[in-house]
Image (spheres, rainbow, N blue to C red):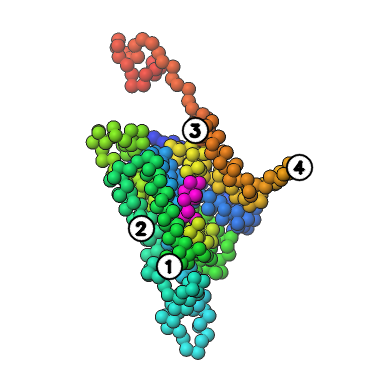
Amino acid sequence: MTQGLFHQNRSVAWFLLALALFVLLVTILSEAAGNGYLSTSFVKTLGKTLCLMLVAVAMDVVWGYTGILSLGHMAFFGLGGYMIGMWLMYARTELIIADSLRAAAIPPTPEEIRDAVGQQIFGVVGSADFPWLWIFADSLVLQLALVVLVPGLLALVFGWLAFRSRVTGVYLSILTQAMTLALSLYLFQNEAGLRGNNGLSGLQNLPGLDAVPQATLSIWFFWASAAALALGYVLFAWVVSGKMGSVIRGIRDNESRVRFLGYHVESYKLFVFTLTAVVAGIAGALYYPQAGIINPAEVAPIASIYLAVWVAIGGRGRLYGAALGAAAVSLLSSWFTGGGAPDINLGVYTVQWTDWWLVLLGLSFVAVTLLAPKGIGGLFDLLSRRHPVPLRTGDFGPDKGARRTVEGEEEK
């Protein structure tokens, strides 16, 4: 299967090769390797960029290949971050509390430690009790399972309700945006059990690894993000290849005709929607420990709109285009909003890119839509385009009227 996949889609091998060389270069230049040409903060930025590339590839499968403009996939991304963040915050706080109480005359009981952990985590919202959401927060294995299950179940239930009702087009996009908005507003409430607007913080500190420097942790997460991107890219390349790829592209182009041919369209759409949601959750679980904090603003509808813009700029319908679009916009955003881009003094007005970045992003989206609808990926199409084999007239085989397997093949 893998050999056939690489043969059918040569961009997979090129993408993996480029990713491997990039990982090797960053590793050599990082502070963890002793060189220090790349700072720890920049390595974290690159690791987060790889996670955004993964969720962009997932978005491209559901939108560029299946034709479902989902404006809610960053909600699944955020849920994955919340699930792993709960364990990180609980385990880290528990270690701190246990160390502080170890010198007490009477050793604390597990219940006392848990109560102290609850007070430490939820005191900021005026509570000390663990909500039911945190029932598995002390187990890394179970929280990792929730990274997959929570986004997957939400996508499965939402997709089943929407697709069985045959909601399509802009109406489906509005529904996904409404789902994201509802989730964001719910998480903003202190009663939701996830610390409301404060979110989960301190996620960059891995429990039990205090002696490991952040430079080393950053390169570990960078490797993990690169591995997840590589596996996700291969998975989605397989999904969009072969018969399944033909069916989902047919759904995108003419859903009624595919249904008339006997395919259960809703099942294909539900599979793609759920699978991409799960991968988005995994990407979020790798992203937020590198970011260090997650709050409800991360799952707001605007985040999913940005995701669609990245895919459009990169070129939807091309996995590598979506990945390149996310990488380009993410890195440029960090440069413009982080003070890297110098301000432009026009005399009467000074252009400060921290304020004008979103305007520039919007103009870029409009320009790509009007002038280069294939996006960045279209440039690679132009570079890799081959000259067609010139057609020959007359007979193509040893016998009169016969034709060879490849038309235009030279006679031997």
Query: Of the residues tagged 4 and 2, which is closer to the observer?
Result: 4
Q: Which mark is residue 149?
A: 2
Disc 3 designates what residue?
Answer: 373
Disc 4 designates what residue?
Answer: 347
What amino acid does circle 4 point to?
Gly
Q: Residues under labels 2 and 3: Cα distance? A: 36 Å
Disc 1 designates what residue?
Answer: 191
Mark 2 or mark 1, which has the lower sequence index? Answer: 2
SS assignment at label 2: helix
Mark 4 or mark 3, which has the lower sequence index? Answer: 4
Q: Position of residue 331 (x, y in %)?
A: 58, 47
Decide if residue 306 is in sight here.
Answer: yes
Answer above or below: position of 144 versus 105: above
Mark 4 or mark 2, which has the lower sequence index? Answer: 2
Answer above or below: position of 143 versus 225: below
What amino acid does circle 3 point to?
Pro
The answer to whether the residues at label 2 and label 1 have Cβ atoms under 8 Å apart is no
Answer above or below: position of 169 versus 301: above
SS assignment at label 4: loop
> For the point 63% across and 45% down, which residue is it?
356
Magenta residues, start to end: 298-307
